[in-house]
Image (cartoon, rainbow, N blue to C red):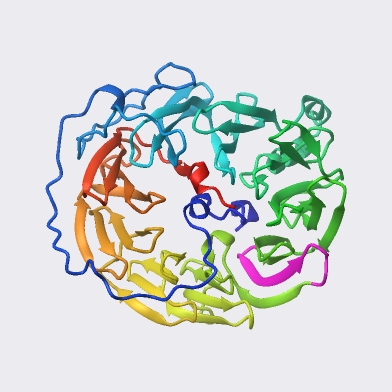
Amino acid sequence: MKIANVPNPILGTAFVLLLASLSCNSPSLDFSDELADRTATPTPLIETAQPTGSVTEPGPTSSPSASPTATPGPTMTPLAPPVDESKPLSSDGPWLVYQARASHSGSGENATLFVVNEDGSGRRMLDQGIPSFYGLQISPEGDRIAYLQRNVDDIPHLVIRFVPSGEVETEITLISQSVLDGAATAQDLKDRLLDAVGRADSIAWSPHGHYLGFVGALDGPSADLYRFDTWSNNIRRLSDEPRNVYQPSWSPDGTWIVHRVGEEIENDGIEGIAAVSFDGRNVKSLYPSNANDFLVAWLDEENFLTSYDTRLGPLGLSRADVDGSSLVVITSAPVSYPEEMMFDGLREVIAVNLRADDPRVDGTLQAGIYLISMASGDADLVLVGDWRSVEWWDGKGVFVANGEQGTVFIRRTGEVVKEMAEIADPVALSPDGAWMVSYGDTGVTVYTHIGTHIRQVVDAAVAKVIWRPDSGGFFIDAYQTNDPGHGHHLYMHDLGDWDLQLVDLDFRGADFWIGPALSTP
């Protein structure tokens, strides 16, 4: 396993950060439920002919007006009528952005992005014909997105775009022509540059959204750290050394950008962890490394966690700081990559999910959910088995493990407080801690926060459930099982009136929430 598979550890999942911030106090479980006695007889789903009009055509947009071409595929009968098509797009959000109607050209598949209100109305095309976009990062102010794309020149480009207008603020070619010309006879050098600047975790917003840090090769034969200023549109070079820069990560106060340095990220090519001040005036070499240390998460404005990347997976956690003091080992136990490790609300406990297919799981190390104490470093196995996921449910103050064995609530102290074997499909947890939704090939079922069955709202196969930030409803990605690569429909289910409405007939994922109302302070 290579570190190239690790996403930006600070954002973790961009959508989780937008939907809920970490609580200062861990709330206690409340097993009283005023909805337990609620009578909820499912109403039949309304089936209609495939709707016409703006549900199948792009709405008003500031982007190119040409209609994108949908990839042909088997048709699927809609499960519900369309949303109110007369309602305009909100001017202040929040908005759901998603990909739909991919088109094909000589350079491959292009993406078309749409934006809708939180109730699914007001659909507008953000832009079409975006080639191979990836590594999307959302501005903390909720007004911009940044992503990478590979154009016909195969060189990664950085694009910053306003939402919901879709206007492009800037587009930066991440390797200059002069650098390419100089590397023309050195293919290994060019390949290393392409790998460094084209990684999904090579861009990062500053905490307040003023700057975007990114890795580029604009001025010399190495990949350096740069800063784009959204106030002035200026680009400033922050690092200048012969080694390449990887995985920039801002400190919570925006003072420092910690990053990895080395010739390459594979084959033990990382040589250390360094830091540069936001203005580039102070550069520090923090931790020389013979062992591919990488940053896991920030603990506060000066301290962060690192782990050691072995060929079998990450090993151990250590506390580091921007002053370059000696590393403090917290645990030497095997851990997961950042996307598989979850902090509790107080950032005192980390849940680690070691799967059965992990090569480190053998006769002495069991698969299961481990809780690691930041204070003692103890790694306690609290739930044995091969689990699909573990996450911190901020709204309820518990870890939630989910797998084919069911769904389990675990206190941050390690106590298992609720086991629900009947909820074995993947679950989506409402931000406010009031609802759980299970989804899969048999449809979507709504439960209360303690697992009380309320109703099944869809009986078609479902690939994803996306909660609204206000927990008032959720979007549903329904698909046809005979051709899961095509024919995905997007629906909105409102919990206020238990109503299901069709949003789009050709949903392609890549979804995220954005808007000033969701921005972090």
Name the residue rendered at 22%, 66% in the picture: 35
Residue 307 x/y as whole percent: 67, 66
The magenta stretch is: 311-326
Vertical position of residue 153 compared to residue 258: above or below:
above
Residue occupying image coordinates x 63% and y 47%: 201
Q: Is residue 410 above or below residue 66?
A: below
The percent coordinates of residue 325 (x first, y second) are 83, 70
| Residue 194 counted in the magenta span | no
Please tell me whether residue 401 is drawn above or below residue 76 in the rendered image. Answer: below
Numbered-mark total: 0
Q: Residue at x 80, y 56 (%)?
A: 274
Q: Is residue 519 left or right of residue 386?
A: right
Direction top: furthest residue: 66
Q: Residue at x 52, y 59 (%)?
A: 21
Residue closer to the observer: 192 or 92: 92
Q: Nearer the viewer, residue 301 or 441?
A: 301
Image location (x, y in percent) of residue 30: 35, 75
Residue 142 image offset from top left, x and y in percent: 55, 42
Q: Is residue 96 left or right of residue 376?
A: left
Q: Does 55 appear above or below 315?
A: above
Quadrant occupied by the N terminus: bottom right
- Horizontal placement of 395 versus 37: left or right? right
